[in-house]
Structures are given as structure tokens and as C-alpha cells.
Image: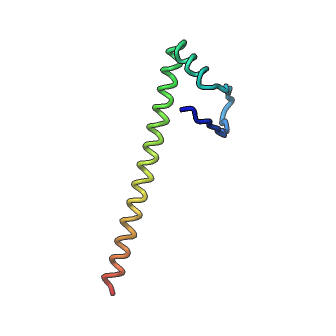
Amino acid sequence: SGISRTATATAIEPTILIQSNREAMVERVQKNPAFALELLIGLSARLMSTTTKLMEKISEVERRSDENLECALSAFSKK
């Protein structure tokens, strides 16, 4: 995408990090299909996890909204 990105991470177990740029990543993917597959599997798992968390948050917001609406309607109907 050409957009510069930075990140901060904290390892929870012994970790080896590599710094890479787009060109080096493309070259590694092209030369090592197993690496490309592992990368896709890892990214897919993260995407599924993020989607699940997002859906849980949406459900929580909807539930709270329903509860707030019921409370407001109840208070209004008592007037």
C-alpha cells in the first residue's frame, strides 16, 4: 500500500523478531511457498479472532441498547 506503519509489541515468550520491508517480504513469499502458506494461515486466524471479538462487542452494545430502551419505556409508561 506504500503507507509507512509502526507497531509496538510485547512478547509473552522467547521470541525472535525480524524487521522487513515490502520488497523483502514479497521475495520471501515468492521463494518460499510454505512461508506464504503459514503467513496466510496466521493472518486468517487473526482475522477470524478479530471478527469474533467485534461481533461480541456489537452484541453487547445491542443488548445494552435494548435494556436502556426498555428502562426508558418503562419509566415513560409510569408517568
Where residue 79 sits in the image (x, y, percent)? 33, 87
The residue drawn where x is 66% and y is 33% is 13
Q: Quadrant of residue 62?
A: bottom left
Q: Is residue 78 left or right of residue 28?
A: left
Q: Is residue 57 left or right of residue 13?
A: left
The residue drawn where x is 42% and y is 59% is 61
The residue drawn where x is 53% and y is 32% is 1
In the foreground, 49 or 29:
29
Where residue 27 sits in the image (x, y, percent)? 57, 16
The residue drawn where x is 41% and y is 53% is 58
Where residue 47 sits in the image (x, y, percent)? 46, 37
Where residue 77 sits in the image (x, y, percent)? 30, 82
In the foreground, 43 or 63:
43
In the foreground, 8 or 60:
8
Q: Residue lying furthest top in this view?
A: 31
Q: Residue lying furthest left in this view?
A: 77
Q: Is residue 21 left or right of residue 78?
A: right
Q: Residue lying furthest bottom in this view?
A: 79
Q: How many numbered marks does the figure carry?
A: 0
Report the coloring of the rendering.
rainbow
